[in-house]
Image (cartoon, grey):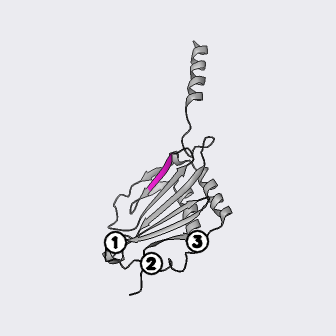
Amino acid sequence: MIRAFVGLAVLLCGCSAPLPGVAGGAPSVVAVHYQVESGPLLPEVQWTARYDITAKGVEFERAGKVAETRVNAGEWTVPSDQPRRQDLLTRLAATNCAGLRRIEPRDAPDGGRTESLTLEYGDGSSCDLLLDPGVTYEGGDALLGPVRAFIADLQLPALAAPELRSE
């Protein structure tokens, strides 16, 4: 009986696939998509910004939310250091995405920025975090901290730098 149980346990352990971001079975992170929305501003100055980070480079896109936008909209390639990009992807792959826990606020604030972070893994799976105003993730700083720091160190091209067009 014990031998059958041990055999079954070994069989089940050998057949289970590790979750993305779980130590020992973490596939590589091939892309990071970070997006932020401006929050409650006048419609003509509301914006969405997105950074796509891969081992090959960084792309930045900004768009307005209405047709009559004053937002400096466009798509740009952002100069960045390849070893720093690879270091970021490697650091993120070591994080246990399955262990993150979304924490809703008791009282959601009236407005605020919304952020989202998606990690794409080499095996086709993904890790998604959506930070509505007031939302946090237990353990989320392990992902959000390095991504935010990487983005803060980027130097946007001169044409992309101003958020709003001069009138």
Amino acid marked by disc 2: Glu
At a point 31% along the width and 72% down the height, the residue shown is: 66
Amino acid type of the residue that numbered disc 3 sits on in the rendered structure: Leu
Between discs 2 and 3, the one toward the N terminus? 3
- Foreground: 89 or 59? 59
With respect to residue 81, does 167 lie above or below? below
Gap between marks 3 and 1 measured at Cα: 26 Å
**Disc 3 designates what residue?**
154
Among the two numbered marks 3 and 1 on one chain, the one whose residue lies closer to the N terminus: 1
Name the side, left or right, on which 95 lies relative to 110.
right
Tally the marks. Answer: 3
| Distance from the alpha carbon under mark 2 to that under mark 3 | 15 Å
Q: Is residue 42 visible?
A: no
Image quadrant where one finds the C terminus: bottom left
Can residue 11 be found in the magenta stretch?
Answer: no
* Residue drawn at point x = 61 percent, y = 56 percent: 89
Which residue is tagged 1? Answer: 40
Q: Are marks 2 and 1 in contact (CB under 8 Å)?
A: no
Q: Position of residue 142 (x, y in %)?
A: 56, 56
Label 1 secondary element: loop
Taking 146 as reference, is 38 left or right?
Answer: left
Which of these two is toward me, 145 or 162?
162
Query: Where is mark 2, residue-wise?
Result: 163
- Counting residues from the start of the chain, the first of labels 2 and 1 encountered is 1
Q: Quadrant of the N terminus?
A: top right
